[in-house]
Image: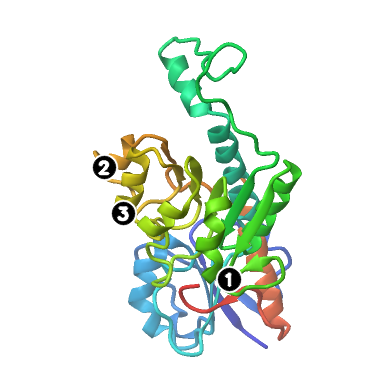
Amino acid sequence: MSGLRVWLPEGALVDELGPVPDEVTLSTLPLSGPLPSDVADVEVVVLAPPYRERFAGLVTELASLRLVQTLNAGIDWVPALPDGVLLCNGSGIHDGPVAEWVMAVVLAQQKRLPHYLTEQAEGRWDTSGNLAFGSGEPARDIDGSRVLVIGHGSIGARLERLLVAFGAHVEGVARHPRPGVHGPSETLRLLPDADVVVLLAPGTPESRHLVDAAFLAAMKPGALLVNAARGMLVDHAALLRAARERRVRAVLDSTDPEPLPDGHPLWSAPGVVITPHVAGSSAYWQQRAYALVGEQLRRLASGREPKNVRRHGY
């Protein structure tokens, strides 16, 4: 192959690509302003969410486009691509940070840290959770707990290793069942036994409001729902009712809409913690992202299949 032309986002960490084959020509797609002169010749576009609108407006001009590589695992935001153009996501880039975020919020909620932070802000020494001195709600153990991971892909596998190290028993649900991982039809059967339910599924029309009133009613009373995926997976009205009735607790890293509007009742719902879509953030995620991009370019230049090919929306 000769003359493989690639567009990178502004500020791309080119040094993290590793060895770039001689036949690869790199240029920058600016977020605004004039376009590079090689529009018709570009074969690979490395895409990040801020470029969605700009890319959507020029995709029909990319006559030679053959592959779009995102810097994210989620690809529901990617505009429709012409027939024959491959879409590859950033699977693996965020596995560690997301799994660690889930562990952090599960530990924090099960050990009642938000409650104690509130008590500290009020200057109260609250011993109600210490069963030796009080009769309030105690902390919950991870050891021996049952965790249901819905969307058990590479992040789910990473999370399972962490949970098992803490003594938890993990059940997985995925679109395509396999040994040790159930299909979606098993979800309602598995919910009543789960102390923690973690959402890692992609945002698709099929998964919209996966967590509805029936889903929440099937959860064990007092169980914890953790959404590290997309806000559209959760019917927020149903969750708000369940939270106000104190039937479930929840940690949401993504909402629908996003950001959550000022004054939305979920901000102050009992037992609900919200973080601003930061589960996958870490100091080194871009280094991992551009290392993957470099590997993809070497694969393409040598005629090999790229990694992480996805169907649009999945």
Q: Earlier in the sequence, mark 2 or mark 3?
A: 3
Corner quadrant of residue 271: top left
Q: Provide the secondary structure element on which disc 3 rests.
A: loop
Identify the residue shown where x is 46% and y is 54%: 218
Name the image quarter holding the N terminus: bottom right
Could you tell whether 99 is left or right of 112 in the image?
right
Dot 3 and dot 1 residues touching (CB under 8 Å): no
Point out residue 175 in the picture as x, y percentages from the top left corner.
Answer: 56, 72
Q: Provide the secondary structure element on which disc 1 rests.
A: loop
| Residue highlighted by disc 2 | 264
- Are there few (<14), some (14-19), or many (20+) residues within 10 Å of tag 1? some
Q: Earlier in the sequence, mark 3 or mark 1?
A: 1
Mark 2 → mark 1, Cα distance in angstroms: 34 Å
Q: Provide the secondary structure element on which disc 2 rests.
A: loop
| Residue highlighted by disc 1 | 183
Corner quadrant of residue 102: top right
Q: Earlier in the sequence, mark 2 or mark 1?
A: 1
Point out residue 110 in the picture as x, y percentages from the top left corner.
Answer: 57, 34
Q: Amino acid at mark 1?
A: Gly
The label shown at residue 257 is: 3
Residue 310 visible in the picture? yes
Dot 2 and dot 3 residues touching (CB under 8 Å): no
Point out residue 120 in the picture as x, y percentages from the top left corner.
Answer: 47, 15
Q: Tell me the mark number nearer the camera, choosing from 2 and 1.
A: 1
